[in-house]
Amino acid sequence: MEIEIEVAENGYIVEWRDPAIMEANSKEGAKWQDPKVQRVYSTQAALIEDLATILPGLKPMEPNQAAEDTAAFNEAFKSE
């Protein structure tokens, strides 16, 4: 899972995809919700405090098998 932190003129913007919303979206018949969550913080202290609650809920990204297969193919046939 990725989390982005952007510096704004008036603080910080944090954006990530909520794993709970993504899981709910994957259920059959579920009404799709945008899993992208964005929050704005006016201070670094507020950002760090909230990150302490956000980070434990994030899951590692699933490997992209297609990208790995392509990389292995390219490596195998790389010209010297």
Image: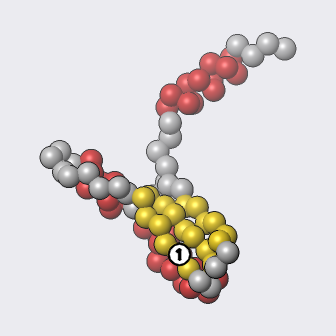
- Label 1 residue SS: strand
For disc 1, the marked residue is: 40
x 61%, y 74%: residue: 12
Residue type at numbered disc 1: Val
Which residue is farthest right? 80
Task: Where is residue 19? Give x, y as percent.
Answer: 38, 59
Residue 58 appears in the picture as rendered: no
Is residue 34 found left or right of 53 in the rendered image? left
Looking at the image, residue 79 lies above or below residue 75: above
Task: Where is residue 40? Give x, y as percent.
Answer: 53, 75
Nearest the eye: 46 or 54: 46
Looking at the image, residue 18 lies above or below residue 77: below
Nearest the eye: 68 or 44: 44
x 27%, y 47%: residue: 26
Picture colour scheme:
secondary structure
Is residue 30 found left or right of 77 in the rendered image? left
x 50%, y 55%: residue: 1
Which residue is farthest front? 9
Nearest the eye: 29 or 64: 29
Look at the image and tell me in which quarter the C terminus lies: top right
